[in-house]
Amino acid sequence: MTERKLFGTDGIRGKANVAPMTPELALRLGRALAHVAGRGKQRPPRIVIGKDTRLSGYMFETAMAAGICAMGGRVMLCGPIPTPAVANLTQSMRADAGVVISASHNPFADNGIKIFGPDGYKLPDAEEIDIERLLLDGNLDQLGKTGAEVGRAEKIQDARGRYVVYAKNTFPKELTLDGIRVVVDAAHGAAYRVAPDVLRELGADVIALGCRPNGVNINRASGALHPEHVAHEVKRMRCNVGIALDGDADRVIFVDEKGQIVDGDAIMALCGVRMLRERRLAKRTLVTTVMSNMGLEHAIAGAGGKLVRTSVGDRYVVEAMRRHGYTLGGEQSGHLVFAEHATTGDGTVAALQVLAILLREQKPLSELAACMERMPQVLESLTLPARRPLDQMSGLSRVIAQAEKKLSKSGRVLVRWSGTEPKLRLMLEGPDPKVLSTLVAEMAAAARKDLGASA
């Protein structure tokens, strides 16, 4: 398959107003998307656009809408709303595509564009490549509409309310959150209104953090990237649980009643084990990525299930789930996909599934999360001056081989380039944290030497 040049593991992403993430690209992308979405239809394509709270969102939202209208498309603007809300609205409103303008967990100066198909799932690689080809095709400019055929844009006034109703309906109707005290941190991002509203309407006593976006504070010392603030508030206010979302609210990190961080792996373990017991885990299989801890694999195996790993990126988790009919998947970072409820990671919906377990079993999160014993893991991200295929980095390749031999079957080594940032990710697992730290340091030094970078 042709390599994608613009689309990474989660759409197009980069520093806002710097190539390739420019309004000019967004306008042209709007044209290409409208052309693809309108193929074979006797009516103009309908496209939903949502965004997070970044200042640059206005710029890209306007440019995308202009490109779509130039091709005769109808744009439905939702304003700031979670990524999974766009996926859900695209499907429920019978739209031909959905666009999310967000850089997720990245700093506010970045932005990105990701696209959902009419079924609410992210576009597969082949369709993204098709759109990339159109972006470079001069013929696209000759296909624009004129006169009465030019498209139009309208605002969906009740977009947030529609998502709140949808999310609440994923929570068991026989349960209520009355008496449950919850801290929720929306990272000053897309869920700053909907997440607290969903929890309050289900009866919870909600303490809201990170719900005052100003365009430049998204993800800043808040949300899933900094759950320590939720942990502090959980202990201070004696809460039952803490919920930390990222900027576009497609992932969630939990905090138990003791103030301990509970990541995506631990949540997949506690949900997966229970779904196995209830015979609700399709084919007794959980889907996750190569980044998930070996402890998760052991927990699922111990309950009689198995774990399937994919490349990093929730899109690949979802693709594997769809291909084989699996019902639960996710990432260590907090992307959690419950196939019976959602087509993509949804932090709010995932939080409701965990809260339902707490209520049904009348046990604290710390006790439930203990079903997984974590294998020591060391992670490091290196920002390097150039991006080179790993097989062309001889020094690093040699150190990786040595590390794999040393750890043997007792651990794992994973080295990869980030799909969304110019960083090299190093991950090692094994029984001895000191050995892991030494090996990671050796690998980092080798990588820097291969690329002529200083420490």
Image (cartoon, helix red, strand yellow):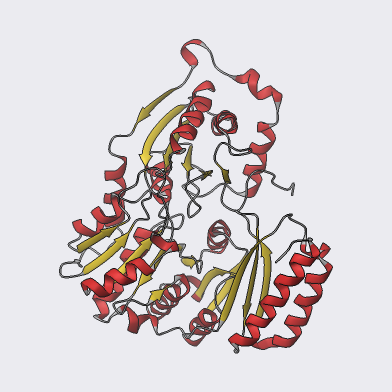
Seen in the image, is 441 located left or right of residue 196?
right
Image coordinates of residue 428 in percent, x first then y, are: 63, 77
Image coordinates of residue 424 in percent, x first then y, are: 67, 63
Image coordinates of residue 350 in percent, x first then y, are: 37, 63
Query: Visible in this render: residue 357?
Result: yes
Residue name at image x 63 percent, y 55 percent: 419
Q: Nearer the viewer, residue 288 or 6?
A: 6
Q: In the rendered picture of this protein, how many numbered marks are placed on residues?
A: 0
**Residue that sits furthest to the front in the current view:** 454
Task: Specify the quadrant of the image occupied by residue 310.
Answer: bottom right
Q: Is residue 143 above or below residue 302?
A: above
Residue name at image x 54 percent, y 80 percent: 297
Residue name at image x 26 percent, y 44 percent: 161
Seen in the image, is 366 located left or right of residue 309?
left
Query: Visible in this render: residue 290?
Result: no
Seen in the image, is 200 located left or right of residue 259?
left
Residue name at image x 25 percent, y 76 percent: 360
Image coordinates of residue 277 in percent, x first then y, are: 39, 81
Q: Is residue 63 above or below residue 296?
A: above
Q: Quarter of the image for the C terminus: give it.
A: bottom right
